[in-house]
Structure formats: C-alpha cells, structure tokens
Image: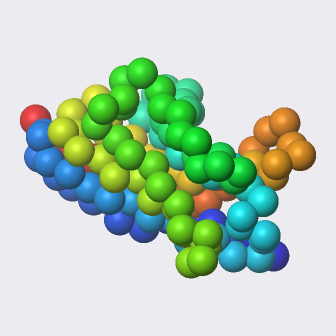
Amino acid sequence: QVQLVESGGGLVQAGGSLRLSCAASGLTFSSYDMGWFRQAPGKEREFVARITWSDGRTYYTDSVKGRFTVSRDNAKNTVSLQMNSLKPEDTAVYYCAAKHSLSGSYNYWGQGTQVTVSS
C-alpha cells in the first residue's frame, strides 16, 4: 500500500531553519506531483508548496515565497521542504501529499509532522 512518512519537524526559534522530508513507498513516485500542506490549530489545512512530476516546477503560497524551498529526489522517492527564516505563524502540522499526474486532487497523504516556532 502507499505510504508517505514525514520527518524533520520540531521546535525552533523564530528566524531558525528546519528541513522536512517525506519518504514515499508503494507508488510510482516519478508520476506524482508532491505537495506540502499545513494545518495550524483552529485553522483549515492550507497549501504550502508543490513540485511537479514532469519538470520539477515549483509553486508556493505567497507567505512562504523566498523562505521555503521544495525539492524532490526521484531516485530516493523523497520530497523535502527546506524552511528558513521561520516565523511563529509557520507553526502547524505539516503534511506531504501525492497527486497522480492524471488526477485532479491529491490521492495520498502522510500522517503529518509538528513544526513549532517560538518567538
């Protein structure tokens, strides 16, 4: 079965950095767009970043542009999110997700990893 397993979350001070990783198994990784989402307490889950399957093009929500970088390694079936200049408002549970190239929505989700940014 398909599994997406996130790692790398933790507690960091404002201005610090964290690198999240997501290991995928049970799917043809190179055929999937990979996305990162987050959900803060009391808020809806929101899109953070995406990297396409075809050409590695990246997309970001405005609030993280210039601070976060999404990347993928198709040989290792992993996707990463490098987060720099973290702010307290980045505090959330971060999820990775996979969307097949022929799908209009994300097909698979990880269990999430907590990121807490202290002021």
- Which residue does the image show at 89% across and 46% down from the upper left? 102
| Quadrant for the N terminus in the image | bottom right
Question: Does residue 96 appear to the left or right of 25 in the view shown?
Answer: left
Q: Is residue 107 above or below residue 72?
A: above
- Which residue does the image show at 81% across and 52% down from the upper left? 100
- Which residue does the image show at 53% across and 61% down from the upper left? 72
Colour scheme of this structure image?
rainbow
Out of 89 and 75, give the one closest to the viewer.
Answer: 75
Visible residue check, residue 113: no
List x then y, in percent, for residue 36.
Answer: 53, 46
Q: Give the quarter of the image for residue 103.
A: top right
- Which residue does the image show at 53% across and 34% down from the upper left? 59
Question: Does residue 39 appear to the left or right of 107 in the view shown?
Answer: left
Q: Is residue 29 above or below residue 88?
A: below
List x then y, in percent, for residue 92.
Answer: 39, 41
Task: Spot the residue most to the right.
Answer: 102
List x then y, in percent, for residue 86.
Answer: 22, 39
| Quadrant for the C terminus in the image | top left
Task: Spot the residue most to the front.
Answer: 55
Out of 103 and 109, give the one closest to the viewer.
Answer: 103
Number of labels in the image equals 0
Visible residue check, residue 69: yes
Question: Does residue 112 appear to the left or right of 10 in the view shown?
Answer: right
List x then y, in percent, for residue 22.
Answer: 52, 65
